[in-house]
């Protein structure tokens, strides 16, 4: 059964568990969910490739989902199905840095990117945050998402990750434009 809320929750909070820098708790209304965080913990001074989850308040812009791995989730968020050619540029020297891209990325040089259509199911459900979006600053971090967790809540590269069942419950509770507060 899918939980439905007439208005939706507009504030989510994540904080790390003491003594475990890559483990945390997400709170949304009365729901408390275990999450995995970046391998280097949480910090305000996020840098590309540092493995830190960025502390701060971020708007959740939209949901991306794999249509071949289940139906469109119940949510008020703007939602778009992923395609096999979807990627995300994480190359600080490229003009498309921290933006969605279509793969393969052409050009005179190789451009570093995340493949959004993954075999490991981590990006079957992805919440896109507005981290380092307006303005985009090269090297301040890209592709910071809320996505599905690896078994055992292994650390992320800087994202927030949770179990699929918890993500589905969370999506049904959210307002159209919620904020995610990540506490340092």
Image (cartoon, rainbow, N blue to C red):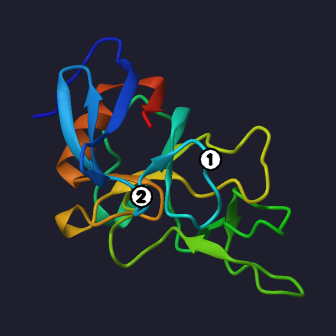
Left or right: residue 71 compared with residue 110: left
The numbered disc on residue 16 is none
Q: Which residue is mark 2?
A: 38
Image position, residue 121 (x, y; %): 33, 69
Q: Is residue 131 left or right of residue 12?
A: right
Residue at 69%, 69% (x, y): give it: 102
Secondary structure type for disc 1: loop
Foreground: 183 or 128? 183
Q: Quadrant of residue 49?
A: bottom right
**Label 2: which secondary element:** loop
Q: Which residue is mark 1?
A: 45
- The foreground one among 50 and 172 is 50
Q: Can residue 122 be seen by looking at this rendering?
A: yes
Residue 130 against residue 99 in the figure, above or below: above
What x and y, as percent, mark residue 18? 25, 43
Q: Is residue 127 visible?
A: no
Q: Give the quarter of the image for residue 56.
A: top right
The N terminus appears in which quarter of the rendering? top left
Near mark 1 (Cα within 10 A), the count class, few <14, some 14-19 or many ≥20, is few
Sequence order check: which comes first, mark 2 or mark 1? Answer: 2
């Amino acid at each position: 059964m899918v939980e439905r809320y007439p208005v939706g929750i507009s504030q989510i909070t994540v904080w790390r568990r003491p003594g475990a820098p890559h483990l945390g708790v997400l709170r949304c209304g009365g729901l408390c969910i275990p999450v995995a965080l970046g391998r280097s913990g949480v910090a305000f001074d996020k840098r590309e490739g540092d493995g830190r989850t960025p502390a701060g308040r971020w708007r959740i812009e939209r949901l991306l989902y794999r249509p071949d791995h289940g139906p469109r989730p119940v949510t008020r968020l703007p939602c778009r199905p992923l395609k096999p050619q979807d990627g995300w540029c994480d190359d600080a020297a490229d003009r498309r840095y921290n933006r969605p891209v279509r793969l393969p990325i052409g050009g005179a040089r190789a451009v570093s990117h995340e493949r959004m259509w993954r075999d490991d199911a981590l990006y079957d459900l992805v919440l896109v945050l507005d981290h380092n979006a307006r303005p985009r600053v090269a090297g301040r971090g890209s592709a910071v998402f809320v996505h599905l967790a690896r078994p055992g809540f292994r650390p992320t590269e800087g994202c927030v990750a949770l179990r699929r069942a918890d993500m589905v419950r969370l999506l049904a509770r959210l307002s159209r434009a919620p904020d995610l507060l990540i506490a340092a």
